[in-house]
Image (cartoon, rainbow, N blue to C red):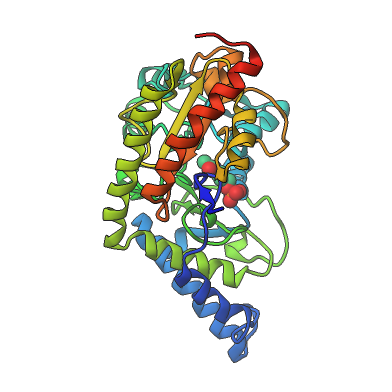
Amino acid sequence: MPKTYLDYAATTPCDPKVTRAMSVFLKKDFGNPSSIHNFGQKASMAIGGARQSVAEFLGCESEEIVFTGSATEADNLAIFGTVKASKITKPHIITSQIEHPAVLESCRELEKQGAEITYLPVNKDGVVEIAELKKALRPNTLLVSIIYANNEVGTIQPIAEIGELIGHAMSSGHRMSKIYFHTDAVQAANFLDCDVKKLGVDLLTLSAHKIYGPKGIGALYVKKGTPIAPVIYGGGHERGLRSGTENVAGIVGLGQAIKEIQNPKLKIQNIKIRQFRDKLIKTILKIIPGSRLNGSLTQRLANNVNISFDGAEGEAIIVMLDQKGIAASTGSACSSGSLEPSHVLLAMGLSEEQAHGSLRLTLGKLTTQQDIEKVFKVLPTVIQRLRKISGYHS
Ligand SMILES: *Cc1c(COP(=O)(O)O)cnc(C)c1O
């Protein structure tokens, strides 16, 4: 049975060019980049090249890129690192209720340690309102961390506008100190402009495995002059911000993946992905009564479909789809396998019951017309069967 993979927001397969570039540094050029000999220098040069590729993508200097062991680690470094380096006695952080757990749980931990945190609400479309953010600013606000594009419902946040607002607040206000702005751009990188100057951010997170690169490698952009302390100590790699022998192959893979997502061919691929997305949304809502789209229709990533079905649980839908050869997700980024309702859907005003019933289909560059048609064929029967079990009547 051919397998249909519609879970690209969870992870992506490595691009063949990525695996080819990586294998050289796993086998032939395996040196430790800290070594002075030729093996080490080759590895060190490769890291430099990858750093340059990431910097070009973000429109920054290569010295402003720190490679980390994951995007989760990059988010942690951005948040804990700036708080640790700050002189504010009780720093205030503004984030949103729809962040990835890597940001949300870091903020919760800092809250336990005495920091003040504002978790901004979102509107029913899942978008942060600028006015809410403006109201939340305080004299002791140190950091604002807002996700660029949400991993569950794909909503795109007005990052450039927020960047501008923070800039204004600093030039006009009687501020104690600078406000730093971080965005998690992990899901955005495939589809949106990540130029850090246009966005007005001081810190930005990327992950390789969401952009057709390997797992276990991330990057944090840290604008020159941003006070930040490490969260990992050791030999002083990555300008002291991330000790530990560099994951050379992983870094090379990230560099290659970043090059590939800037390939002009991708623009055409992304148009196709968006057409598939629109077809999925339109058709599912039409052929399955009692279904509802979650998240904005317009401010939405080109590859994200997130739909709730009355009388059918998300997890049960996923299991049944898997039996029919379709890999999908409920969208919740929780890896514990717990059946908690999605914090993102709850923040958007859905009831607990509705927040349990969602199906996320995320598309990628290998998605085909046949994949889409398979969903149309299989999904209505799955929902019908589950509704029969739950005793739901429309
Ligand atoms: C996947 C994801 C992460 C975590 O990335 P890892 O590299 O797997 O740690 C962080 N933020 C968002 C928005 C994600 O989708």
Classify 356 as above or below 66.
above
At horizontal 72% and vertical 35% (from top left) the residue drawn is 337
Can I make out residue 117 in this image? no
Picture coordinates of residue 297, whole percent (x, y): 33, 27
At horizontal 53% and vertical 59% (from top left) the residue drawn is 66
- Number of numbered discs: 0
Picture coordinates of residue 377, whole percent (x, y): 45, 36
State which image quarter holds ligand 1. Answer: top right
Q: Nearer the viewer, residue 115 or 380?
A: 380
Q: Name which quarter of the figure residue 373 lies in.
A: top left
Picture coordinates of residue 299, whole percent (x, y): 33, 31
Q: Name which quarter of the figure residue 163 lies in.
A: top left
Classify 177 as above or below 386.
below
At horizontal 53% and vertical 19% (from top left) the residue drawn is 347
Farthest residue toward the bottom?
38
Picture coordinates of residue 392, whole percent (x, y): 58, 11
Classify 322 as above or below 112.
below
Q: Nearer the viewer, residue 256 or 360?
A: 360
